[in-house]
Amino acid sequence: MIICQPPIKPKNKHIQSILASSKLRLLRLRKSNPVVEHEVKQTLKNPLATLLGYYTKNPNDSDTIAILLHGWEGSSQSTYIQLLADSLYQTGLDIYRLNLRDHGDSHHMNEALFHSCRIEEVVHAMQNIQAQFPDKDLVMCGFSLGGNFALRVAARTKDAGLSFKHVFAVSPPIIPKHSMEAIHNSKIYNKYFLRKWKRSLHIKHQLFPHIFSDNRWQDEKNLERLTQMLIVAHTEYTSTDDYFNGYSITPEIIAEINCPTHVITAWDDPVIPFKDFSTIDRLPQIKLITSKHGGHCGFVQGWSMRSWIEDHVINEITK
């Protein structure tokens, strides 16, 4: 484990977590956002799903593409994705911002609901991207649930024929049941995620009303009970325990990762218990990078509103 002390300010874990997604930080881009201005929208079709992605080619003919994965109920437009994308683009990289199923403007692309165990369709999307750009190196960076997906994709590279120059997982849930408990026990985060998930479900309901057998989910105010209700009704899992185990980052998954990988977390993350990372730092190709402060996906460094994550990723891939 590598303990670092970047200049994180403010030190409050909740302010850091809120700033991670705050639109206020996008003021840093001022009037120009070349990653979005020059993006090419793509629909990535595979036998399991159709996913939405945005590719931005760097004018300097980069030999590397950074694939960025957002967190649960985030999107390719999330603040932390846009700012890391801009920093990497300014460094000279191509950018690919991938949306998970039912995230961003993609609810209409698949009838079945998103859930966190849908790893195969993300692997297929990565294969699609690699096939489009066979002469470029791939770097993958995921935040929160996107970091969890990034680790599971990295564990499947051999079987899937994928190759990553570097993988970064920022604030990933390792034992999802513990993360759900942390969210459930917090009035702030329970309300936040419940509101965002219900907004997504309402969009899905308008598009595919027949997939919901009743409307009880609309009145549910408990995130844990809503998860139980929808998982049992819309997946092959019969309990939330089975479902959470389905996307846990186990020692077996860690052992399958054979590319340089950094798992980055803060001790004070309010929704990802630090004790869950005890199984991570065991292999030479995987480094657990921790800091005392940073909250959940924040790591913001004062009034510049720049995240230390941006500098760390750039430093690693340009070595």
Image (cartoon, rainbow, N blue to C red):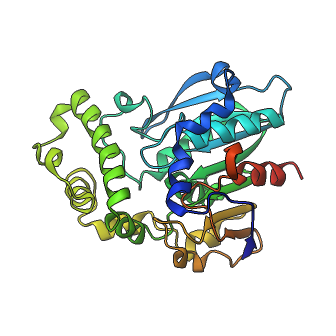
Q: Which residue is found at the position 36% from the left and 65% from the top?
A: 180
**Residue 282: horizontal and vertical position, in percent?**
69, 79
Quarter location, residue 37: top right
Compare residues 270 and 203 and report the one nearer the observer. 270
From the viewer's side, name the closer residue of 224 and 258.
224
Residue 192 in percent (x, y) is at 36, 50
Is 233 situated above or below 56? below
Q: Quadrant where the N terminus lies?
A: bottom right
Task: Report how many numbered discs are placed on residues in the image.
Answer: 0
279 shown above or below 219? below
Q: Residue 124's spot in the image, x, y percent?
A: 54, 43
Q: Residue furthest right?
A: 319
Q: Is residue 50 above or below residue 276?
A: above
Image spot of residue 300 (x, y percent): 65, 52
Q: In the picture provided, is 33 more to the left or to the right than 70?
A: right
Quadrant of residue 88 in the image?
Answer: top right
- Residue at x-position 68% and y-position 46%: 303
| Residue 165 seen in the current view | no
Q: Nearer the viewer, residue 69 or 247?
A: 69
User: On the picture, is 112 further left or further right than 21?
Assistant: left
User: Could you tell me which residue is drawn at 22 percent across and 59 percent down?
Assistant: 222
> Could you tell me which residue is drawn at 19 percent across and 38 percent down?
211
Q: Does residue 47 lie above or below 7 as drawn?
A: above
| Res 255 seen here | yes
